[in-house]
Image (cartoon, helix red, strand yellow):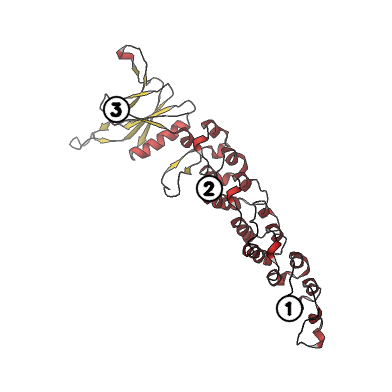
């Protein structure tokens, strides 16, 4: 096949090339002109031509001449850096099958092409573990993989967060766990460095932070001071406050909500704690100025290790107290 061209006789070889691979046999400076002439006559290149025959400086031009009707995503990973993005765009425009997370793990991908590849994955059938079980992917790619997957409805498991996903992204992973079916005992299986990691419950509520244990256990709130109700016991011994076994902690200043969150966290760090009580500490008057009104120092936090199954609002302080017991 001869291509019509109007060039000097010294470069007549450019007119005689019939395949893209033949253009690759020319000096680097002539390859672009050869492919340009070929494009006008309907020449097509293959991925192999662009990856191994054509010089990488002309990779983009070569990949723009590929027939992508049968090209797969993984084949684009064999291309030089300059052609990977063009190749992926061609696969997308041809409407071929989407990429898989495994496709995006090739060590030959450039950083920008990995992100592009991950955006082409069909996450409706992808698993969270795949995002973390790919050794070729640095940790920042795991985050991108989970982020796009989350938008597509992907869920992670506690095992994914404990052993598959890099610990630097444990918070993101835990935020994708369906805790309605995750037993609290699984929180203890997490590595120590992420067991107490703070996670957000929702994108639109960034101020609400909780721990893994908070999520799965679901604190059960009661109004009043924590008590154990003993059925059938004499009236005076029917409600036990267990002050002899509880651990007291003073929280200076802040709000009731902040004190409650701090008290719950203290309970999580106490192995035998099963309930917490939060109430304002007793008001005191400045001894140097007796005319000033009494002011509260903050809140009192009680960590209970004995059985708590009820609450009492009999006293003045208990009327404003809150008791929380751990579920599960």
Residue 179: assigned label: none
Q: Where is residue 12 in the image (x, y as percent from the top left)?
A: 81, 84
Indicate which label's residue lies in the foreground, 3 or 2. 2
Element type where label 1 sits in the image: loop
State the residue position of label 2: 153
Task: Decide which of 164, 153 is in the foreground and name it.
Answer: 153
Q: Position of residue 57 (x, y in %)?
A: 71, 71
Instruction: State the residue at coordinates (68%, 54%).
Output: 103
> Dot 2: few (<14), some (14–19), or many (≥20) neighbours within 10 Å?
few
Element type where label 2 sits in the image: loop
Residue 78 location, quadrant: bottom right
Horizontal side, residue 40 vs residue 328: left or right: right
Classify the position of the N terminus by image quarter: bottom right
Task: Decide which of 102, 169 is in the foreground and name it.
Answer: 102
Determine whether label 2 and label 1 are within 8 Å by CB.
no
Residue 276 location, quadrant: top left
Element type where label 3 sits in the image: helix
Q: Find the distance from the CA under tag 2 to the CA under tag 1.
A: 47 Å
Sequence-wise first label, 1 or 3: 1
Residue found at the far left of this picture: 291
State the residue position of label 1: 41
Sequence-wise first label, 2 or 1: 1
Q: Can residue 165 be seen in this view?
A: no
Q: Can residue 87 be seen in this view?
A: yes
Indicate which label's residue lies in the foreground, 1 or 3. 1
Determine whether label 1 and label 3 are within 8 Å by CB.
no
Sequence-wise first label, 3 or 2: 2
Residue 318: assigned label: 3
């Amino acid at each position: 096949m001869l291509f019509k061209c109007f060039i000097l006789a010294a470069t007549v070889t450019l007119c005689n090339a019939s395949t893209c691979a033949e253009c690759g046999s020319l000096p680097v400076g002539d390859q672009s002109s050869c492919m340009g002439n070929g494009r006008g006559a309907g020449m097509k290149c293959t991925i192999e031509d662009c990856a191994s025959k054509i010089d990488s400086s002309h990779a983009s031009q070569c990949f723009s001449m590929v027939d992508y009707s049968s090209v797969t995503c993984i084949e684009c990973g064999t291309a030089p850096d300059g052609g990977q993005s063009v190749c992926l765009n061609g696969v997308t425009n041809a409407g071929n099958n989407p990429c898989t997370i495994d496709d995006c793990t090739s060590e030959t991908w450039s950083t920008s092409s990995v992100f592009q590849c991950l955006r082409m994955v069909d996450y409706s059938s992808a698993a969270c573990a795949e995002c973390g079980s790919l050794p070729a992917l640095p940790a920042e790619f795991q985050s991108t993989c989970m982020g796009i997957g989350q938008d597509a409805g992907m869920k992670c498991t506690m095992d994914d967060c404990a052993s598959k996903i890099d610990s630097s992204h444990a918070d993101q992973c835990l935020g994708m766990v369906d805790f309605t079916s995750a037993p609290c005992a699984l929180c203890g299986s997490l590595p120590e460095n992420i067991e107490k990691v703070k996670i957000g419950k929702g994108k639109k509520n960034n101020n609400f932070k909780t721990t893994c244990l908070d999520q799965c256990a679901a604190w059960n709130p009661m109004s009043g001071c924590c008590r154990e109700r003993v059925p059938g016991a004499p009236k005076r011994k029917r409600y036990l406050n267990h002050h002899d076994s509880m651990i007291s902690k003073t929280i200076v200043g802040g709000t009731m909500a902040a004190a409650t969150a701090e008290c719950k966290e203290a309970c999580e760090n106490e192995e035998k704690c099963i309930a917490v009580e939060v109430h304002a500490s007793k008001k005191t008057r400045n001894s140097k100025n007796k005319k000033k009104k009494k002011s509260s120092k903050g809140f009192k936090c009680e960590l209970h290790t004995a059985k708590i199954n009820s609450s009492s609002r009999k006293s003045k302080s208990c009327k404003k107290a809150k008791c929380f017991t751990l579920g599960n």
